[in-house]
Amino acid sequence: MANKDEKKSGNTLVHDTIALTVITLIAGILLGGVYTITKKPIEQQNEKIKAEAYAAVYENAEFVDDKTVDDALVKYNEKLAAGEIKADAMGETLSDVEISEVMKAQVDGADAGYVVTCSAKGYGGSVVLALGVDKDGNILGIRVTDCSNETPGLGQNSATSWNEQYVGMAKGDSGLSVVKDGSGDAKSGTVNAISGATITSRAVTRAVNGALDFIASLSE
């Protein structure tokens, strides 16, 4: 009797294992199919968002790749990750900053500045933004393209009053910093934090500092 029960138990285990394996395979195939189907539309949507952001932060310009800039960016990102780049005004390294793309902005066929996609870690994840910078290192426009994991209130439209604080600012000697007392102004390179979202405000400012420092390094 015991042998029959053991045999039955063994058969049930084999059956359950086979069933679980089949279910796992089917689920994997279905997930793979969904990924394949959605991958291209997602990529197209991301490219559309980026193109709209670039057009907003650097108006009436065309954007082109530059191999020299790309090569320099690879080395700079390595320095960022290693904690070798510091924002003196904020008193911290920019090891959480990543610059994913830098393109030259051209107006009437002449180099006029750069557009940058960069990010830094905020409260709940990375804050991604697009930045337009003229050839003298001044910020022309800024648009946050992804802050989905952050405290509500940052705003993803470059026309918001908070984002506009950065316009006209430049790297200066020590970079930009964030203040919480409302005393921020462009001349001193200080940005007023969003009420209740200081961590997010600092993340955006670190990303901006990294982008401005990289652009400044291209002319050194």
Image (cartoon, rainbow, N blue to C red):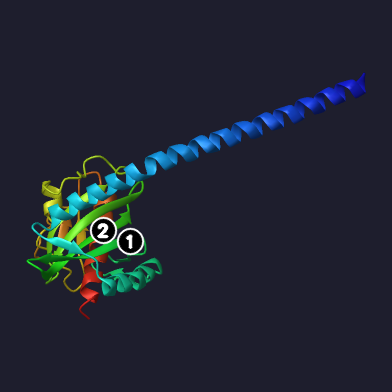
Residue mark closest to the camera, 2 vs 1 = 2
Disc 1, SS: loop
Q: Position of residue 217 (x, y in %)?
A: 24, 76
Which residue is found at the position 23% from the left and 58% from the top? 205
Residue type, numbered disc 1: Val
Q: Nearer the viewer, residue 137 or 16?
A: 16
Q: Which mark is residue 97?
A: 1
- Quarter of the N terminus within the rendering: top right
Q: Is residue 151 above or below residue 88?
A: above
Outermost residue on the top side: it is: 1
Q: Position of residue 155 (x, y in %)?
A: 19, 43
Asked if one can make out residue 78 in the rendered structure from this viewpoint, the answer is yes
Label 1, residues with CA under 10 Å away: few <14, some 14-19, many ≥20 = many
Q: CA distance from mark 2 to mark 1?
A: 11 Å
Q: Position of residue 119 (x, y in %)?
A: 30, 56
> In the visual, does 6 lie left or right of 163?
right
Residue type, numbered disc 2: Thr
Mark earlier in primary sequence (2, 1): 1
Q: Is residue 212 above or below residue 152?
A: below
Q: Where does label 2 land, which residue? A: 117
